[in-house]
Image (spheres, rainbow, N blue to C red):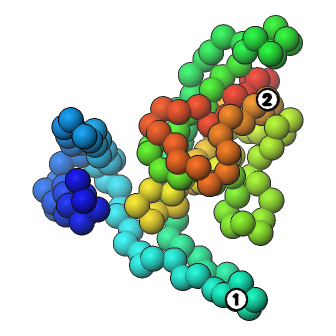
Amino acid sequence: MKTSEIRDLIDFISKSGLNEVNIETKELKLSVKREPDQKIFKSSPALSAPVQTVASPVSAPVAPPVIAAVKPDTPPASAGSGKKTIDIKSPMIGTFYRSSTPDTPPFVSVGDKITKGQTVCIIEAMKLFNEIESEVSGTIVKIPIENSTPVEYDQVLFVVEPD
C-alpha cells in the first residue's frame, strides 16, 4: 500500500466511527485501533533547522498519555537476583523515543526507580507523540530498545523489577 492510500484509509476510519480495522494481504498486515472517545490531532511535518544555526524548540502536538501494557514475566537468565520482572510493552506501532527532544535527558535509564503513572518514553505514530506511562512501580533493569527505532505493538520496551 502507498502512504497516500494508508492516509485515505485512516481518514475513512475516523469519519466512519469505527474503532478497529484489520487488513491483511500477502504484502501487508495493517491494524488500526483507536479509543472510542479519543481526540484526533492533526499536525504538519516537523520543521528542520540548518545544522549551524540555533533555532527555538518546536513543540509537536502530544496525544493524551497512553498507559503501557504490562505483563508479569519470568526473570531473565542474566538477572540473577531471583526476583520476578514485569515487561512494559508498546501499546502501539510507532517510533520509540527515550526523551522528549534530542537535547534533553531520557525519561528513565537502567537502575532508575519509577512509579505508577510516570512517563517512561514517547512513541511517535502518524506525527502524534504519545507519552507512555508505567502501570507499575519498581526499578528499570533493562531497556532492550534503542532510541529512535521502530517498535511493534506488544514489543517489550522496558523490563521492570517491581517494588
Q: Which x, y percent locates residue 137? A: 73, 32
Q: Which x, y percent locates residue 128? A: 46, 63
Q: Is residue 53 left or right of residue 7?
A: right
Residue that extends furthest to the left in the rendered view of this protein: 16
Q: Give the amino acid at mark 2.
A: Val
Which label is found at residue 141?
2
Image quarter hosting the C terminus: top right
Residue 75 quadrant = top right
Q: Which x, y percent locates residue 72? A: 61, 17
Q: Residue at x 52, y 38 (%)?
A: 90
Disc nearest the viewer among 2 and 1: 1
Q: Considering only vertical position in the picture, is 53 above or below 40?
A: below
Q: Give the amino acid at mark 1.
A: Ala
Q: Nearer the viewer, residue 65 or 144?
A: 144
- Using a 10 Å C-alpha cutoff, classify the residue at mark 1 as few (fewer than 14 neighbours), some (14 to 19) or many (20 or more): few
Residue 58 quadrant = bottom right
Q: Is residue 69 left or right of residue 161?
A: left
Which label is found at residue 80?
none
Q: Nearer the viewer, residue 151 or 131?
A: 151
Q: Considering only vertical position in the picture, is 109 above or below 95?
A: above
Residue 138 in view: no
The CA span between labels 2 and 1 is 36 Å
- Using a 10 Å C-alpha cutoff, classify the residue at mark 2 as few (fewer than 14 neighbours), some (14 to 19) or many (20 or more): some
Q: Name the residue tied to disc 1.
A: 55
Q: Residue at x 45, y 37 (%)?
A: 153
**Element at label 1:** loop
Q: Residue at x 45, y 76 (%)?
A: 45
Q: Is residue 35 left or right of residue 76?
A: left
